[in-house]
Amino acid sequence: MAYELPALPYAMDALEPFISKETIEFHYGKHHATYVNNLNKQVPGSRFENASLETIVKEAEGSIFNNGAQVWNHSFYWNCLKPEGGGEPEGKLKEAIDREFGSFGQFREMFSQAATSLFGSGWVWLVCDRAGKLSIVQEQNAGNPLRKGLMPLLTCDVWEHAYYIDKRNRRPAYVEDFWKVVNWKAVEAYYLNRVA
Amino acid sequence: MNTHVKDLQFPSLPYAYDALEPHIDAMTMEIHYTRHHKAYFDNLMAAVKDTEMADMPFGELLRDISKFPVAVRNNGGGHFNHSLFWNIMSANGGGKPQGELAEAIKKAFGSFEAMQEKFNTAAKTRFGSGWAWLCVKSDKSLEICSTPNQDNPLMDLSECSGTPILGLDVWEHAYYLKYQNKRPDYISAFWNVVNWEEVSKNYANAI
């Protein structure tokens, strides 16, 4: 069973001017695609032959984990974004954010701080535990919160390849623009559909 | 390395931004040196200010890094690593080392090409951000390894330990503007700008 590169849920230029077409062409067309290709080369003959991507993310180590988790993380990241996104969450997710972080503004500040201060390559996540309690976690490299039993709701890729073409060394500027393309409807859906 | 941390200076780049073209482009050099390296240097100085760390020799601080805050590890490593990196490249670089270093490479790896291949693998397979190194171990032999982020083999918490004499930055910021996702192309190009005279000096100082 081969792992597949999922279709990008919008056009390559859909997130402009916040994330450029060129960035998406490389990020989706090269980086994400390469993780898929590498995974398909490495899984045959391993104990993960026929395993779901989620099993690989939760249980694999080394190169199979790195490539598998990067496939999962990038697919999730694309789904967290949309053209004309941004704004604020509504309904039950808004209530949960207010409860946990005080306000959306405070949540946003904490998440941005986590994204700008993660040293090296990695991902910042909004997650919830089985009781529905929200938290923000930083993960190095291909790290994924599913390994800790936490449900991902929103992620920001802070590998330099996510922003270097557009923003060079200015990661805070990328994080600032990230908020303008967040697909809060998708994040709300992840929250409502979480495994209770 | 005996310089007290508080007396460290941001080093001048030993060549122009465009000196390593076409292998490393001028825009990358300028941002890498004036933004990334400068930020590590400034953050290091801010992190040690008014602490006992400011009065320590820099080499000692790096060696005992596990005792100090993570900001010092990240920024102190960032400053050391980039300072070494600029010095081991040159516009007239490339070719092969001579003399004792050439002998030591042959002894440790069989041939210069075998050393290159091992170094290339270390640089390509470092997942995420980090560095590949050619080091002198405590028994004076040579070794190749890689470290994550801004760690280096001088640090007590590093998996490989030794004195780095050649290093390659494989953070994406080191190559993304010119090579994007093609890290192996950047690694191949790097050999054209290695300043073997400087690496030989580092070797002589390390043994």
Image (spheres, rainbow, N blue to C red):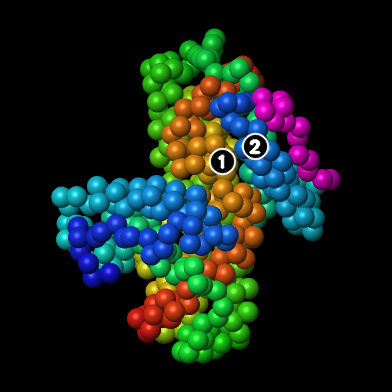
- Please, what secondary structure does the residue beneath circle 2 have? helix
Where does residue B163 sit, x and y in percent of width and height? Answer: 39, 74
In the picture, measured across the screen, residue A157 lies left or right of residue A55, that is: left
Where does residue A1 sit, x and y in percent of width and height? Answer: 84, 45
Label 1 belongs to which residue? A165
- Residue stretch in magenta: A1-14
Where does residue A184 sit, x and y in percent of width and height? Answer: 58, 18
| Residue type marked 1 | Ile
For the stretch drawn in magenta, what is the main secondary structure? loop
Distance of label 2 from label 1 (alpha carbons) = 8 Å
- How many marks can you see? 2
Label 2 crowding class (10 Å Cα cut-off): few <14, some 14-19, many 20+? some
Residue A75 visible, this orientation: yes
Q: Nearer the viewer, residue B197 or A134?
A: B197
Quadrant in the picture for residue B11: bottom left
Q: Nearer the viewer, residue B88 or A185?
A: B88
The residue that appears at 71% across and 41% down in the rendered structure is A29
Q: Which of the chains bears the disc numbered 1? A: A
Image mark for residue A22: 2
- Please, what secondary structure does the residue beneath circle 1 have? helix
* Dots 2, 1 in contact, CB < 8 A: yes
In the picture, measured across the screen, residue A109 lies left or right of residue B148, that is: left
Q: Quadrant of the C terminus of chain A?
A: top right
User: Is A2 located above or below residue B145 in the figure?
Assistant: above
